[in-house]
């Protein structure tokens, strides 16, 4: 049996701490507020608040080798030693202390917020002994006894939600019954049946999004968690008895080559995780996690960005070969046709003379005098004179092969086994090196300041892989490096508070909380002109705030008006970013663009603060999508809707919804909708 130690409720979320009367283990149950009296689950082992593994301790049993480092002697030795609370500014912080007989201590810190049903969790392990110890696992969060509303096996009750992510196909929701993943106990409750998944390297959104949800379909509750850091991460689903456990954080020694040695008196804090429990499905749970970033993002937004201006990025016109002549022609076309664009971004290539895929002149960041013979000054002046902010692209974390002075500066670069990590034509600056940071401060921050730029698009187009040298383990070295990279992002925001920062990593590879909190918006994908754009853009509503969700709307001179409507409607699922050959667009295209931009401005408050709902059949093939999606938003007295009919495909049934043969703006909507918050 278990006794309740404490219960706390804020923002529609209840945190219930229970202690097992037998072994004394303390677990955390998260519940939608008001559902506390419905909890039944007492027929499984309590899931300890902190899962840790020291190299000095024995490994866990129950066929765990190679599958999990959880639930071993290190974890079992931690006993409840007390709890403290602190409340201020709409947040309640609960710190639970655990101790083991050797003097080691673990701190489990939960923060609840008044404005959102999501909580933040961190864990810390401290060496209280007289000899060094090595952590091989330290989870950021653990949620157990799922579902607490059930008793017994409850077959068919639990569904597991994960999101897959490939380049230009990000955020695909995959939902599976727990039984299909073999997350059932054995007849003897002996084998630790476990599913461990995640990402290795510094593309945290590749293969999987750092997210997992567990839905109780009988009782209508979904638990979800997101890891937030931007290096190797893992999630683990474990079921040894009747209760399911979800835990995660840094990828451990087995999965991500991470271990950390602690000297006597030293401690280590695992990166933050965000968790929730909501009455509803996976979309409500994911929305709560994404909404948690708002309180960090909004205070630092530059004034122009608060209005969510429309953007124009020239990349899909030049493909990495911008020139002064081309930029000035586009700027004049946007001005002359009253496009309503607020930001003009010069993308990759302003420093190089090659098309982007062949370019590798990364490191010196000097303006190409061939492409911009007078420098960027006249171009920036023209952009400002046209009433737009001026932006520029950087990929400052790398050194390129075509910049030999930088490429050969190996003492400044990340190494693995003593050799510089080289991927294609890129090597990677080591941001733990102070000289690197100061060099880039001058080349990037100084450049933005000197050129009077208002916007920076920060790209990152290769992954280092599992780790690097410079710490006791490759995974720990990579974690420390990425934290240093993020400190540089923060420095840009601090020294240039009026500059808008866009996050990009080959599109959507860095859409994790710790990076999203450092940027004003993010590139949703590198799907530039694809039919699947609205599908991917809608996926992003589960990952980030729609106000951060920058979506390509590429316009071609020969493009039909239905295709143009399709592109613009796709952009209304987030931040509209036009691209293409603006100086060659037709008069009828300009008329539709002006109308679309005006509609976007009406919808912007709802895009920012609304609630997303997605209805209709799933899209199986992203490359050949079929069917229809419709997003609609109810905002006070107005009803705004945007029809997105997906292209018909051979041998597929046409959409049988309302007539979609003509574009529609105002009207009644079905399908995927975004409704104004109350």
Image (cartoon, rainbow, N blue to C red):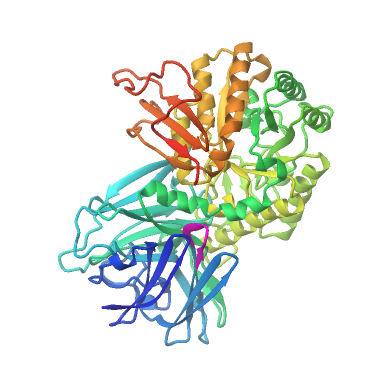
97 or 238, nearer to the observer: 97
Look at the image and tell me whether residue 599 can be seen.
Answer: yes
Point out the stretch of residues depicted in magenta: 111-119
Q: Residue furthest left?
A: 187
Percent across and percent down for residue 42 are: 25, 72
Q: Residue furthest front?
A: 637
Indicate whether 312 appears above or below 140.
above
Query: Principal SS element in the magenta part?
Result: strand
Q: Quadrant of the N terminus?
A: bottom left
Task: Please indicate whether residue 215 sits to the left or right of residue 301 in the image.
Answer: left
Task: Find residue 310 and report its image quarter.
Answer: top right
Q: Please name the residue shown 46% across and 49% down the image.
A: 287
Specify whether residue 189 is painted magenta. no
Percent across and percent down for residue 22 are: 28, 82
Task: Please indicate whether residue 379 sits to the left or right of residue 573 in the image.
Answer: right
22 or 598, nearer to the observer: 598
Task: Please indicate whether residue 227 sits to the left or right of residue 520 in the image.
Answer: left
Percent across and percent down for residue 611 are: 47, 43
């Amino acid at each position: 049996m278990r006794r309740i130690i404490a219960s706390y409720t804020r923002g529609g979320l209840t945190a219930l701490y229970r202690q097992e009367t037998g072994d004394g283990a303390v677990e955390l149950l998260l519940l939608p507020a008001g559902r506390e009296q419905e909890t039944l689950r007492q027929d499984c082992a309590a899931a300890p608040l902190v899962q840790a593994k020291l190299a000095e301790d024995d490994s866990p049993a129950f066929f765990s080798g190679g599958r999990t480092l959880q639930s071993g002697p290190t974890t079992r030795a931690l006993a409840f030693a007390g709890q403290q609370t602190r409340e201020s500014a709409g947040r309640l912080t609960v710190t639970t202390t655990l101790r083991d007989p050797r003097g080691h201590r673990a701190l489990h810190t939960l923060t609840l917020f008044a404005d959102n049903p999501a909580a933040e969790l961190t864990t810390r392990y401290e060496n209280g002994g007289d000899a060094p110890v090595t952590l091989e696992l330290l989870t950021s969060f653990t949620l157990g006894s799922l579902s607490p509303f059930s008793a017994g096996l409850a077959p068919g009750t639990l569904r597991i939600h994960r999101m897959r992510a490939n380049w230009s196909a990000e955020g695909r929701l995959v939902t599976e019954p727990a039984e299909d993943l073999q997350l059932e106990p054995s007849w003897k409750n002996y084998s630790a049946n476990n599913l461990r998944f995640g990402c290795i390297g510094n593309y945290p959104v590749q293969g999987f999004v750092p997210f997992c949800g567990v839905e109780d379909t009988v009782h209508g509750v979904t638990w979800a968690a997101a890891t937030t850091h931007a290096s190797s991460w893992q999630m683990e689903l474990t079921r040894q008895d009747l209760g399911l456990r979800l835990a995660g954080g840094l990828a451990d020694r087995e999965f991500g080559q991470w271990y950390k040695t602690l000297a006597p008196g030293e401690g280590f804090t695992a990166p933050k995780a965000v968790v929730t429990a909501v009455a509803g499905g996976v979309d409500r749970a994911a929305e709560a996690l994404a909404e948690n970033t708002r309180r960090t993002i909004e205070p630092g937004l530059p004034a122009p960005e608060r209005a969510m201006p429309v953007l124009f990025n020239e990349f899909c016109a030049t493909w990495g070969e911008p020139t002064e002549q081309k930029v000035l022609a586009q700027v004049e076309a946007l001005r002359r046709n009253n496009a309503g664009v607020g930001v003009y971004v010069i993308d990759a290539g302003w420093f190089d003379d090659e098309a982007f895929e062949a370019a590798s002149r990364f490191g010196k960041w000097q303006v190409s005098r061939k492409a911009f013979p007078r420098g960027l000054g006249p171009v920036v002046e023209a952009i400002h004179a046209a009433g737009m902010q001026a932006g520029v692209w950087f990929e400052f974390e790398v050194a390129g092969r075509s910049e030999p002075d930088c490429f050969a500066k190996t003492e400044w670069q990340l190494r693995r086994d003593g050799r510089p990590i080289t991927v294609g034509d890129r090597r990677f600056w080591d941001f733990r090196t102070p000289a690197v940071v100061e060099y880039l401060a001058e080349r990037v921050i100084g450049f933005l300041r000197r050129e009077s730029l208002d916007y920076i698009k920060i790209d990152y187009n290769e992954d280092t892989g599992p780790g690097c040298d410079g710490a006791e383990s490759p995974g720990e070295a990579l974690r420390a490096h990425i934290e240093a990279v993020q400190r540089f992002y923060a420095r840009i925001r601090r020294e240039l508070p009026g500059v808008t920062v866009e996050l990009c990593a080959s599109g959507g590879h860095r859409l994790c909380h710790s990076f999203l909190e450092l940027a004003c918006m993010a590139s949703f994908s590198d799907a530039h002109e694809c039919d699947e754009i609205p599908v991917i853009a809608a996926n992003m509503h589960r990952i980030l705030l729609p106000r951060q969700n920058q979506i390509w709307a590429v316009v071609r001179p020969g493009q039909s008006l239905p295709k143009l409507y399709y592109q613009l409607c796709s952009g209304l699922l987030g931040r509209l970013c036009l691209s293409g050959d603006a100086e060659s667009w037709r008069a009828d295209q300009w008329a539709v663009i002006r109308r679309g931009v005006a509609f976007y401005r009406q919808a912007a408050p709802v895009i920012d603060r609304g609630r997303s709902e997605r209805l209709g059949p799933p899209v199986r093939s992203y490359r050949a999508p079929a069917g229809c999606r419709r997003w609609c938003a109810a905002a006070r007295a107005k009803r705004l809707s945007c029809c997105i009919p997906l292209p018909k495909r051979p041998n597929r049934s046409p959409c049988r919804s309302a007539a979609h043969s003509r574009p529609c703006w105002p009207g009644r909507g079905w399908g995927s909708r975004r409704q104004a918050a109350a």
